[in-house]
C-alpha cells in the first residue's frame, strides 16, 4: 500500500482491490478533472494537503454535493484502509475480509464528515483514523448479532430509527411507513422475548392479536387509516423483515470502482460551490497554528509520561489491546485473567490517562475542566493512542 | 453479547446466570407479559449498573426514582440513579444497531423525573427459563445530557420519545466518569415547563380510564401534560399501578375506610382490634396514647391492619408491618387521630428506611416519618380532622408502596 503524495491524486483516486490483499490506486477521471480545474482557477491557493482538505470540507458544509463528498471520500481512503487492516488483525476468525471491511467503512464517510469538528484539534484524517475503527467494530458487532437472529427476533431487536430507514430505503410513501411502524410497535407489544427465545414463531393467534391492537390504536397513533386484517399485518411485517435484512446487509457495491465518465457534463454546475470563506480561513489558521502544534506535542508528552506511571500490568494490557490489536477475549486467554477484570482494567487504564490529561490542563494550563473540555481531551487521547500504537502516517 | 467487541471507552458489565434468574423471579408480579419483560430487562440492568458503579466509585450510588420501580417499569422504560449528587437516567435497549438513544418523554419533561445525564445501555438477554443460562454482558456505550436532549435530539410525537443519533452521543464513558468527578456542578439540565396541577377529581378520572390493563399504551392514551402530571405525583402513579395490577378490584371495592363509623363498631374488613392482632403476644401489645385528655377513653377506638411489604428490590426479605389507627372524639364535628406503625409480631424492629406519610386528598404530603436502623415503632404527629375530611396514609419502603384511603 503506497501513500499518495500528489495533491490531485489525494482527492481523485480510490483503492481498488484486485485480490484479497492486493490493491492499486485507480483514478476517477471526473474527480481528477474537477481537481485540476480547481487548481487552475485558484493559482493563488497553496498546493498543500491541508489547504485542499479545508477547501473540500468547507465546500461539503455549504453544499454537500455528491461530487464534493467523493473528493473527501477519495481523501479518506488511507484511514479507512488502516482501520480495515486493524479489523482483520483483531477479528481473525471472522468471515469478513479486508475488502469487505474497507467497503463497509468507506460507505460511512458521511458519518465521519458529520461527526468531524474542525475546531477540536484533530485533523480530518486523524479524526477519520479514530472514527473508522469504532464504526467498523460496530458494523461487525451488529452483523454478528443479526446473524444470530431469526426473522422475528430481528424485528424485536431493531431500533425504530433503523426500521424507518430500512423502509425509506425501499422507497415507501411516508403514510405507508407510518402504518408499518405502528404494526411493528403492536407486534413488539404482543410478541415477547420469551416466546421468541423458545423459538415459537408467530402464529395466526399472534397476527390476530397484533391486528386487533393495531385497529384499536390506529385512531390514536395514526391520523387517517382503515382497519387491517391479520393477514395484512403478517404481510406487512414480513416486508419489514426483508427490508431490515437488506438494509443491514447491503450487497457489497463496488464503491471503489472507478466512476464512469458519463457525468462529465455536470462538472460546471458542481463547481458552483459557495465556500464559507471565514470557516476556511479559520481551518487553515488552525492547521498552521504553531501554538496548537506546540500544545499537541505537550499533550503527547503528558500522556507518554502518564502511561509510564501506570502499573506494568496495565501497560501490558494497553499494548496488547491497542498495538497487538487483540480482542479483550484473546487477552483474557493469553493472560489467564477473567473477562471482567480484563475489561475493567483496560477501562481503568484509559480512564487514568484521561484523568492525568485533565489534571495537567487544570494545573499547568490553568483551565478549569468543563464537560466540553473533557470531551476534547477524550479526542486528544484517542489521537495519541493512534499515534503511540497505530499508524503514524495518519497523524498530521 | 460477545466480549470480543468490547472497547475500553465503554463499560461492559457482567450479568451472571444467578443474577438473571433472580431478576426474573423478582419480575413475576407484573401487569402484562410486555411489562414483565420490560421489568426484567430494567431490573437486570439496574443490578448490573449499581454493582458495577458501586465497585468502581467512591461516590454513593443509589436508586433515585421518586416512584416505585415496579410502577415505573409497568409503563415506561428506564430508571433514575444518583451518583454522588448527580441524577442520571439509565436506558436499557435491546436494539442491536445502537443507532440512537431513545428517551421516553417522561424522563425529560416531568420535572421530578428529569436528570442531568442519560446513559445508553445495550442489553441482550435470553429468556431465563432456558436451561442454558450463560453469563451475559451489558454494554454502556454512550451518554448525553438533558440539555442536549432538549436542544439537538429529535422529538417523536407518535411514541413520545426524544431520539438522539449515536454520533451526537459522547461515546467515551471514561469522560463521563471524569466529568462527574471534575465538574460536579456543571449545569446540564435545560429549562422545562412545569406541568399543570391536577385536581383530585381530574386525577381520579384519569386513573379510572388508564387503570384498565387492557390499554396497551397507557402513556400514549391521554395528552402528555395530563399523563406527566399524573406520574409526577408519586402516589397517583402508585395508584395507577395498583389499579392496573389488580384490575378486578375497582377503587370503590378497594374501599375507603370510613373512620366515623368505627365509633358505631362498623369496621372495614382487615382492620382488627389489637387484641386480635396480638393474640398470644400480649406482652408485646402496643398502647396508643391519648393521655392528654384524661377521661375520654369511652370515645377512643384503635384498630390495626397487617400490611405485607412485598419489595421486589435488592436483597431484602419481605416483611410485615402493622398499621395502627387510633381515634378520639374531640367535638361532635372533629376527631383526633393518631397513627403508628409497628413491626409484626415476629419482629422486634421495623425495617430501616421505611417512610410513613400523611397525604391530603390531592395527594400532597402533609407530614412523614422515616425509620432508622432500630426503631420498634414510628408515629405521625397527632392530627385533627373535621368530619368529612378525606386523607390517605402511605407506606413506602424500597420499591414498595401502599396507600390506604380514609374519610373521617
Image (cartoon, coloured by chain):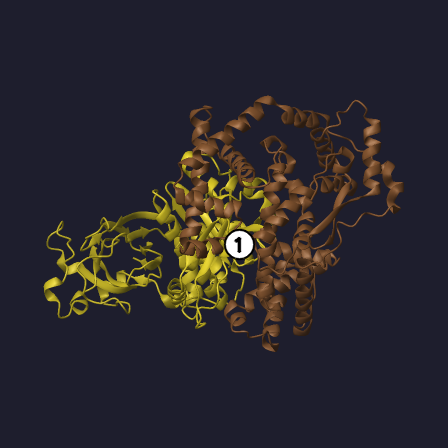
Chain colours: A brown, B yellow
Task: Determine the chain carrying the residue at label 1.
Answer: B
At a point 32% along the width and 58% down the height, the residue shown is: B407
At a point 24% along the width and 61% down the height, the residue shown is: B321
Q: Quadrant of the C terminus of chain A?
A: top right
- Relative to B32, say whether A293 is above or below: above
B297 left or right, relative to B200: left
B63 left or right, relative to B338: right
Q: Quadrant of the N terminus of chain A?
A: top right
Residue B199 appears in the figure: no
Residue farthest to the right? A265
User: Where in the figure is residue A198, as x and y percent of width and height?
Assistant: 51, 73
Residue density around tag 1, few if under 14, some if 14–19, many if 20 or more, within 10 Å:
some
Q: How many numbered discs, if any?
A: 1
Q: Which residue is mark 1?
A: B5
Residue B56 appears in the figure: yes
- Relative to A137, say whether A56 is above or below: above
- Relative to A75, say whether B2 is above or below: below
Amino acid at each position: 500500500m503506497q501513500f499518495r503524495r500528489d495533491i490531485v491524486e489525494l482527492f481523485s483516486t480510490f483503492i481498488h482491490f484486485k485480490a484479497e490483499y492486493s490493491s492499486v490506486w485507480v483514478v476517477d477521471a471526473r474527480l481528477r478533472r474537477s481537481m485540476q480545474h480547481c487548481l487552475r482557477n485558484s493559482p493563488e491557493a497553496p498546493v498543500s494537503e491541508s489547504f485542499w482538505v479545508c477547501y473540500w470540507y468547507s465546500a461539503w458544509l455549504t453544499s454537500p454535493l455528491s461530487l464534493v463528498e467523493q473528493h473527501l471520500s477519495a481523501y479518506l481512503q488511507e484511514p479507512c484502509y488502516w482501520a480495515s487492516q486493524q479489523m482483520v488483525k483483531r477479528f481473525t476468525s471472522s468471515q469478513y475480509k479486508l475488502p469487505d471491511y474497507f467497503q463497509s467503512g468507506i460507505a460511512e464517510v458521511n458519518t465521519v464528515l458529520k461527526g468531524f469538528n474542525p475546531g477540536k484539534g484533530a485533523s480530518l484524517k486523524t479524526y477519520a483514523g479514530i472514527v473508522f475503527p469504532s464504526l467498523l467494530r460496530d458494523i461487525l458487532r451488529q452483523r454478528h448479532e443479526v446473524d444470530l437472529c431469526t426473522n422475528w427476533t430481528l424485528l424485536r431487536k431493531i431500533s425504530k430509527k433503523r426500521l424507518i430507514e430500512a423502509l425509506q430505503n425501499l422507497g415507501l410513501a411516508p403514510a405507508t411507513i407510518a402504518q408499518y411502524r405502528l404494526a411493528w410497535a403492536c407486534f413488539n407489544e404482543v410478541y415477547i422475548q420469551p416466546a421468541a427465545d423458545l423459538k415459537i414463531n408467530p402464529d395466526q393467534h399472534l397476527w390476530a392479536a397484533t391486528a386487533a391492537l393495531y385497529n384499536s390504536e390506529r385512531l390514536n397513533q395514526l391520523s387517517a387509516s382503515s382497519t387491517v386484517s391479520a393477514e395484512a399485518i403478517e404481510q406487512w411485517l414480513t416486508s419489514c423483515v426483508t427490508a431490515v435484512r437488506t438494509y443491514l446487509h447491503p450487497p457489497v457495491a463496488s464503491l471503489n470502482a472507478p466512476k464512469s465518465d458519463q457525468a462529465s457534463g455536470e462538472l460546471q454546475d458542481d463547481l458552483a460551490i459557495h465556500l464559507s470563506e471565514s470557516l476556511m480561513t479559520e481551518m487553515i489558521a488552525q492547521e498552521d497554528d504553531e501554538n496548537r502544534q506546540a500544545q499537541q506535542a505537550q499533550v503527547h508528552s503528558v500522556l507518554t509520561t502518564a502511561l509510564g506511571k501506570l502499573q506494568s500490568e496495565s501497560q501490558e494490557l494497553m499494548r496488547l489491546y491497542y498495538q497487538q490489536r487483540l480482542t479483550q477475549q484473546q487477552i483474557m486467554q493469553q493472560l489467564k485473567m477473567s473477562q471482567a477484570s480484563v475489561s475493567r482494567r483496560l477501562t481503568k487504564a484509559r480512564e487514568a490517562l484521561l484523568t492525568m490529561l485533565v489534571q495537567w490542563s487544570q494545573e499547568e494550563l490553568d483551565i478549569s475542566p468543563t464537560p466540553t473540555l473533557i470531551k476534547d481531551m477524550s479526542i486528544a487521547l484517542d489521537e495519541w493512542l493512534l499515534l503511540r500504537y497505530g499508524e503514524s502516517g495518519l497523524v498530521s | 453479547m460477545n466480549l470480543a467487541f468490547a472497547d475500553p471507552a465503554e463499560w461492559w458489565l457482567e450479568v451472571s446466570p444467578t443474577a438473571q434468574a433472580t431478576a426474573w423471579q423478582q419480575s413475576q408480579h407484573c401487569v402484562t407479559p410486555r411489562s414483565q419483560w420490560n421489568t426484567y430487562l430494567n431490573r437486570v440492568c439496574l443490578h448490573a449498573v449499581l454493582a458495577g458503579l458501586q465497585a468502581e466509585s467512591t461516590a454513593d450510588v443509589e436508586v433515585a426514582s421518586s416512584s416505585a420501580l415496579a410502577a415505573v417499569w409497568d409503563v415506561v422504560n428506564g430508571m433514575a440513579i444518583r451518583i454522588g449528587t448527580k441524577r442520571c437516567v439509565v436506558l436499557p435497549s435491546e436494539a442491536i444497531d445502537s443507532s440512537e438513544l431513545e428517551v421516553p418523554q417522561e424522563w425529560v419533561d416531568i420535572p421530578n423525573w428529569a436528570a442531568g445525564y442519560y446513559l445508553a445501555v445495550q442489553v441482550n438477554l435470553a429468556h431465563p427459563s432456558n436451561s442454558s443460562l450463560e453469563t451475559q454482558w451489558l454494554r454502556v456505550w454512550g451518554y448525553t445530557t438533558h440539555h442536549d436532549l432538549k436542544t439537538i435530539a429529535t422529538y417523536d410525537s407518535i411514541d413520545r420519545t426524544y431520539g438522539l443519533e449515536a454520533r451526537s452521543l459522547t461515546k467515551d464513558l471514561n469522560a463521563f466518569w471524569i466529568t462527574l468527578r471534575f465538574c460536579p456542578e456543571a449545569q446540564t439540565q435545560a429549562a422545562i415547563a412545569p406541568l399543570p396541577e391536577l385536581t383530585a377529581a381530574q386525577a381520579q378520572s384519569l386513573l379510572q380510564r388508564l387503570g384498565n390493563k387492557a390499554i396497551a399504551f397507557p402513556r400514549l392514551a391521554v395528552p402528555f401534560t395530563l399523563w406527566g402530571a399524573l406520574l409526577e405525583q408519586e402516589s397517583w402513579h402508585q395508584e395507577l399501578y395498583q389499579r392496573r395490577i389488580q384490575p378486578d378490584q375497582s377503587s370503590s371495592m378497594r374501599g375507603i375506610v370510613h373512620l366515623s363509623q368505627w365509633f358505631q363498631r362498623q369496621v372495614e374488613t382487615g382492620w382488627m382490634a389489637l387484641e386480635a392482632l396480638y393474640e398470644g403476644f400480649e406482652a408485646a401489645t402496643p398502647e396508643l396514647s391519648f393521655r392528654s385528655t384524661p377521661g375520654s377513653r369511652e370515645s377512643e377506638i384503635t384498630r390495626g391492619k397487617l400490611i405485607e411489604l412485598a419489595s421486589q428490590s435488592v436483597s431484602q426479605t419481605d416483611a410485615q408491618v402493622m398499621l395502627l389507627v387510633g381515634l378520639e372524639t374531640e367535638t361532635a364535628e372533629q376527631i383526633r387521630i393518631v397513627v403508628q406503625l409497628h413491626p409484626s409480631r415476629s419482629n422486634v424492629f421495623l425495617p430501616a428506611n421505611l417512610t410513613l406519610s400523611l397525604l391530603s386528598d390531592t395527594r400532597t404530603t402533609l407530614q412523614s416519618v422515616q425509620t432508622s436502623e432500630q426503631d420498634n415503632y414510628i408515629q405521625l404527629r397527632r392530627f385533627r380532622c373535621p368530619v368529612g375530611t378525606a386523607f390517605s396514609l402511605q407506606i413506602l419502603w424500597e420499591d414498595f408502596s401502599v396507600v390506604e384511603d380514609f374519610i373521617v
